[in-house]
Every structure is written in C-alpha cells, then in structure tokens.
Image (cartoon, grey):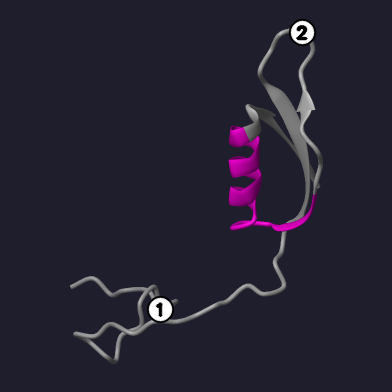
Amino acid sequence: MRIRIEGTTQETAAAAELLREVFNVREVSSFYPNRGRSTLGRVYVDVEFARPDTVRATATRVEHPAQQVAGTQPKQLR
C-alpha cells in the first residue's frame, strides 16, 4: 500500500517515522516540494499491513491471578 504524506520536510519525516510503529515500512521516497513558493511538499511511503515481528501477549491481574485481562470469557451479571 502506498501512503502520501504532505507537510514540511520535518513534518513528513516525523510522520513517516511514526508509520513504522504501525506498519512494516518498505520504502520512503525523497521529499518532493510543491510548486511555486510553497514550503510544503510530499513524501510517499510504501507499507505492508502486517508486521512479521508483532508481539502478542496475555496479561494476568495482580489482585486476581485467576482472571485474565481482556479475556474471551463473558462476565456473568449478578
């Protein structure tokens, strides 16, 4: 998937770096300045949805070790 980011050189660099937290970034293009006297431009980022190094974890409540946090069992109402 290709994402277009528009802004200043600093903004586009920061946004491209933030995308690395969510996506597997394959490539980031050079900064392309907009026409005229604009200080803005654009960067194209090629990404994949799934990151191969994604970590999945489960947690246990400290005060109730038998209960899982965000478990799949529905709670029973009293």
Name the amino acid type tagged 1: Gln
Could you tell whether 34 is left or right of 40 in the image?
right
Residue placed at 49% from the left, 80% from the top?
57
- Quarter of the picture holding the C terminus: bottom left
Which residue is label 1 attached to?
Answer: 73
Which quarter of the figure has residue 63?
Answer: bottom left
Judge by depth and name the residue closer to the eye, 20 or 13. 13
Q: Is residue 52 inside the magenta stretch?
A: no
**Alpha-carbon span between mark 1 and mark 2:** 59 Å
- The range drawn in magenta is 10-27
Any magenta on residue 13?
yes
Q: In this image, 45 relative to 18: left or right?
A: right
Which one is in front in this view, the residue at disc 1 or the one at disc 2? 2
In the image, farthest residue toward the top: 36
Q: Residue 21's spot in the image, x, y percent?
A: 59, 58
For label 2, the SS is: loop
Q: Residue at x 68, y 57 (%)?
A: 23
Instruction: Check disc 2 and give the amino acid type.
Output: Gly
- The residue identified by callout 2 is 36
Report whether 28 appears left or right of 57. right
x and y percent of residue 74 in the render?
A: 37, 74
The residue located at (63%, 27%) in the rendering is 8
Taking the view exactly as shown, the residue that stands out farthest to the bottom is: 66
Q: Which of pointers 1 and 2 lies earlier in the amino acid sequence?
A: 2
Q: Is residue 77 left or right of residue 48?
A: left
Q: Residue at x 39, y 82 (%)?
A: 59
Expressed as whole percent of the image width and height from the top left, the position of residue 37 reads 71, 8
Residue 50 position by quadrant: bottom right
* Label 2 environment density (alpha carbons within 10 Å; few <14, some 14–19, many ≥20): few
